[in-house]
Image (spheres, grey):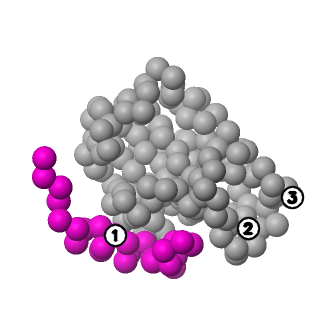
Amino acid sequence: MRTTLHLALGSNVGDRRAAIEGGLRAFAALVDAREVRSSGLVETAPAEGAIGGPFLNAVAVLAFDTPEAATLPERLLFAAHRVEAAYGRDRTREGWHGARPLDLDLLALSLDGVPVVRPEAPALPHPGLERRAFVLGPLAEVDPDFCHPLTRRSARDALAALRAEPEETA
């Protein structure tokens, strides 16, 4: 079964570029990816209450074969957490908003071209996907044809809509 995964990568601690590039290579090896495409890196301020310095972010598209789809999202999340830990991420110590040597998020998954939609963890598509400009920009770059399986909007359209929203005031 041909599998396509859209993966967000971010880092705001240490050698951010090395963490993202090495983390992507390690994740691709774990899933035995046949094809890997990656966006360029973008630097952004920490968002959603994250602490630490600026983030480098990217999005990658990985293609691989999987014989078993039933537990694939959980296996991919486990692989992502394993790679994050190898790069020094300690989810229990850092909490929700801690600085991240490497952060990997499953954005969207499709099996033989059919999007996987599931509300339970790991939720797919990622629930924050269309609210994160630091993801939508690189996503539109690496996969201009990406279409959100629930909203049916392209990454470019979702990014334009997000940028058109008035900023919240405190």
Report whether 78 appears left or right of 7. Answer: right
3 or 2: tag closer to the N-terminus? 3
Residue 51 x, y percent position in the rendering = 30, 32
| Foreground of the two, 135 or 19 | 135
Picture disc at residue 159: 1
Question: Which residue: 62% across, 47% down?
Answer: 121
- What residue did someone put label 3 on? 67
Label 3 Cα crowd, 10 Å radius (few <14 / some 14-19 / many 20+): few
When asked about the image quadrant of residue 100, the answer is top left
Report whether 119 appears left or right of 129. Answer: right
1 or 3: tag closer to the N-terminus? 3
Picture disc at residue 111: 2
- Element carrying mark 1: helix
Q: Look at label 2 and name its amino acid.
A: Leu
Q: Which residues are magenta?
A: 145-170
Label 1 Cα crowd, 10 Å radius (few <14 / some 14-19 / many 20+): many
- Element carrying mark 2: strand
The chief SS type of the magenta part is loop
Question: Which residue: 55% across, 42% down?
Answer: 23
Q: Look at label 1 and name its amino acid.
A: Leu
Q: Is residue 159 magenta?
A: yes
Residue 145 x, y percent position in the rendering = 51, 79
Residue 35 can be seen in this image: no
Q: Is residue 76 magenta?
A: no
Residue 143 x, y percent position in the rendering = 50, 72
In this view, the residue farthest toward the left is 169
1 or 2: tag closer to the N-terminus? 2
